[in-house]
Image: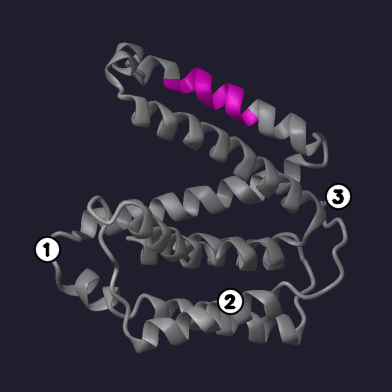
């Protein structure tokens, strides 16, 4: 499903170009083609599974596509809101409102059953989310949407590297995600494409 979720940065890129009329040079276009072509190679082993496996149902794919569109829409709306809010203010508003909306669906008593390592993981995820999306909001303020899209598209590469580190630390807990030669070539294309697509002067592109 990670492959389908990569629609999100692609939609974000298109939104920046067509909705906010951001400039997109020919060299950036070449970088974007390399980037998304590389993602196709990186996930080449997963594509046949998605198309043929009953586990990867149509309903599941539709839900992930909807999630990708919803996330990209949120990011594009955030770009517009940065006209009235600072990055910190917007991050605070989003998390406070999100937290309040999730309270009715939360089971706080289950926290008492968490182990020590589960608490560590929970706290890490909380800080990681706040810091990560805080940085994302700031990037949306100072960069073109298309450039932000290019950078976040390399997330699967970091996921793969993190998996390798986790296997090294706890080989009995985590298992290796095998990659073929095409996947490694795709990873190289993704990294180079992201660098090329992100080239340009870093100026504020917050829509007026």
* Nearest the eye: 2 or 115: 115
Q: Counting residues from the N terminus, which is met first, the one under dot 1 or under dot 2?
A: 1
What residue is shown with label 1? 54
Report the Cα–Cα distance between label 1 and label 2: 32 Å
What residue is shown with label 3? 208
Report the Cα–Cα distance between label 1 and label 3: 47 Å
Q: Horizontal placement of 146 versus 47: left or right?
A: right
9 up-or-down from 115: above or below: below
What residue do we see at 28% from left, 65% from top? 176
What residue do we see at 45% from left, 55% from top? 68
Residue 27 in the image, given as x and y percentages of width and height: 73, 86
Q: Nearer the viewer, mark 1 or mark 2?
A: 2
Can I make out residue 41 in this image? no
Magenta-colored stretch includes residue 186: no
For the N terminus, the image quarter is bottom left
Q: Nearer the viewer, mark 2 or mark 3?
A: 2
* Nearest the eye: 186 or 121: 121
Q: Nearer the viewer, mark 1 or mark 3?
A: 1
What residue is shown with label 2? 191
Can I make out residue 21 in this image? yes
Magenta-colored stretch includes residue 99: yes
Badges 1 and 3: C-beta atoms under 8 Å apart?
A: no
């Amino acid at each position: 499903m990670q492959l389908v979720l990569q629609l999100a940065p692609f939609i974000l890129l298109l939104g920046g170009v067509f909705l906010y009329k951001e400039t997109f040079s020919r060299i950036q276009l070449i970088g974007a083609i390399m980037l998304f072509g590389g993602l196709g190679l990186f996930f080449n082993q997963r594509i046949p599974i998605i198309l043929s496996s009953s586990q990867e149902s149509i309903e599941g794919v539709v839900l992930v596509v909807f999630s990708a569109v919803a996330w990209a829409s949120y990011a594009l709306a955030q770009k517009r809101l940065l006209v009235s809010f600072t990055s910190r203010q917007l991050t605070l508003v989003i998390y406070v409102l999100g937290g309040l909306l999730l309270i009715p669906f939360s089971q706080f008593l289950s926290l008492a059953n968490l182990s020590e390592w589960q608490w560590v993981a929970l706290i890490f995820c909380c800080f990681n989310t706040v810091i990560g999306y805080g940085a994302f909001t700031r990037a949306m303020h100072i960069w073109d949407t298309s450039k932000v899209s290019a950078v976040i598209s390399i997330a699967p590469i970091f996921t793969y590297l993190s998996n390798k580190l986790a296997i090294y630390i706890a080989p009995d807990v985590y298992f290796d995600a095998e990659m073929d030669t095409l996947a490694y070539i795709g990873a190289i294309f993704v990294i180079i494409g992201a660098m090329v697509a992100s080239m340009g002067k870093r100026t504020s592109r917050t829509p007026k």
